[in-house]
């Protein structure tokens, strides 16, 4: 059963996700940040559906198990799509959208194939179909988080290079970078030290609140016209 | 071996993204001019804010009812300020350049706190004015 902390985090997460969608619609920015809005809307809907299933069928039910893992895997792939949409926004004037789409598709397929291959080596040790499926999803997710982290890092590097100055875009990308790196670090630490699992299990729900919260603050507070030089953002001690 | 490598890379990236995110919040507030009322309330003289004022300013921020949308920013910058304190203490003897930079960043954090206070004071003043106009 879920603890009161998990309930609180889930509710906070749902509120922030709904907030992002509402503010994007109210400000007329939904089309401009379509992937962000769609991801938040899907995440909200899946979150509500998860709790409906949890209440009706219970935590131990097969339906909850499959729905949780399917929706989690699907949302991670959606987040990947959000990242690609941010790439498109940064490089929109360069006419490279087709290359980016093909590259993203290849990378996604490659990561899925790699995750399946890693799991296929361990299939003999696993007995039940449920466990095989769950392990594939977890393996895929952790690989996607790391690929996501690398891609966000590259995007941030490119933004500094092209002197991207849209404050909203800068903050959306940086918040996504924090999210991907926290998840990737958490999964890696869980692999290294399985005994910390009980503590590390709280990191993903906390980060799941932080991303929509940070995006909500950005959408709510920063106007689309706001500009910020990336040189003010990158930490660099100056010699005097 | 691979999880250890992923862990190290991820933590380094997390730190860099987090610091850049905080700096983007601070830089956005750096353009805001403080009102006379806020300067008076916060005891800021001659437009100068010091790094050591940060906690005092945040206490004043805590006394002001919040508009409900700046908690994540305050939390992030407070964490960043703690990181800067640790960095300054660690680098004071080894690298004065880094320690000086950390001090300048602490001043920016304090200015961010002052701008947050300014925003909350304005919000509450507007709220009061609106309520007075309804009752009047």
Image (spheres, coloured by chain):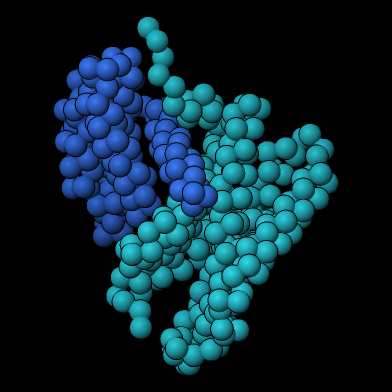
Chain colours: A cyan, B blue
Q: Considering only vertical position in the picture, is B73 above or below A206?
A: above
Mark yes or no: residue A17 visible: yes
Residue drawn at point x = 60 percent, y = 56 percent: A144
Please indicate whether residue A55 sits to the left or right of residue B109 in the image: right
As drawn, the residue found furthest toward the bottom would be A57
User: Residue A112 appears in which quarter of the rendering?
Assistant: bottom right
Q: Nearer the viewer, residue A216 or A65?
A: A65
| Callout count | 0
Across and down, in percent, residue B5 comes to 49, 45
Residue drawn at point x = 55 percent, y = 67 percent: A138
Please indicate whether residue A239 sits to the left or right of residue A21 in the image: left
Q: Considering only vertical position in the picture, is A161 above or below A187?
A: above
Across and down, in percent, residue B51 comes to 23, 26
Residue drawn at point x = 40 percent, y = 28 percent: B30
Please indicate whether residue A199 sits to the left or right of residue A236 in the image: left
Q: Quadrant of the N terminus of chain A?
A: bottom left
Q: Considering only vertical position in the picture, is B39 above or below A80?
A: above
Q: Quadrant of the C terminus of chain A?
A: top left
Residue drawn at point x = 40 percent, y = 71 percent: A11
Q: Nearer the viewer, residue B112 or A137?
A: A137
Q: Nearer the viewer, residue A174 or A72?
A: A72
Across and down, in percent, residue A38 comes to 63, 62
User: Residue A58 appears in which quarter of the rendering?
Assistant: bottom left
């Amino acid at each position: 059963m879920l603890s009161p902390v998990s309930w609180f985090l889930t509710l906070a997460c749902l509120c922030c996700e709904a907030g992002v969608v509402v503010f994007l619609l109210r400000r007329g920015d939904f089309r401009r940040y379509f992937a962000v809005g769609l991801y938040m809307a899907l995440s909200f809907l899946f979150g509500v559906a998860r709790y409906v299933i949890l209440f009706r069928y219970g935590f131990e039910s097969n339906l909850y198990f499959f729905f949780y893992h399917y929706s989690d895997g699907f949302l991670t792939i959606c987040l990947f799509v959000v990242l690609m949409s941010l790439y498109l926004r940064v490089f929109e004037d360069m006419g490279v959208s087709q290359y980016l789409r093909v590259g993203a598709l290849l990378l996604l397929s490659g990561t899925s194939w790699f995750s399946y291959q890693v799991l296929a080596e361990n299939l003999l040790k696993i007995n039940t179909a449920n466990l095989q499926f769950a392990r594939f999803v977890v393996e895929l997710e952790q690989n996607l988080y790391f690929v996501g982290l690398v891609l966000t890092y590259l995007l941030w590097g490119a933004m500094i290079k092209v002197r991207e100055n849209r404050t909203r875009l800068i903050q959306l990308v940086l918040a996504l970078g924090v999210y991907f790196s926290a998840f990737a670090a958490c999964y890696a630490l869980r692999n290294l030290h399985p005994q910390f699992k009980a503590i590390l299990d709280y990191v993903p729900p906390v980060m799941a609140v932080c991303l929509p919260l940070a995006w909500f603050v950005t959408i709510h507070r920063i106007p689309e016209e706001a500009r910020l030089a990336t040189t003010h953002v990158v930490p660099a001690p100056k010699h005097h | 071996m691979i999880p250890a490598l992923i862990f190290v890379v991820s933590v380094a990236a997390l730190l860099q993204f987090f610091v850049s995110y905080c700096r983007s919040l601070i830089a956005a507030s750096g353009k805001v001019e403080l009102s006379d009322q806020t300067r008076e309330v916060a005891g800021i003289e001659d437009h100068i804010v010091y790094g050591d004022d940060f906690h005092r300013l945040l206490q004043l921020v805590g006394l002001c009812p919040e508009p409900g949308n700046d908690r994540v920013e305050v939390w992030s910058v407070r964490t960043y300020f703690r990181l800067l304190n640790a960095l300054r203490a660690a680098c004071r003897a080894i690298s004065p350049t880094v320690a000086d930079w950390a001090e300048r960043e602490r001043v920016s954090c304090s200015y961010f706190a002052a701008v947050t206070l300014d925003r909350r004071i304005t919000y509450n003043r507007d709220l009061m004015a609106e309520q007075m106009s309804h009752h009047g």
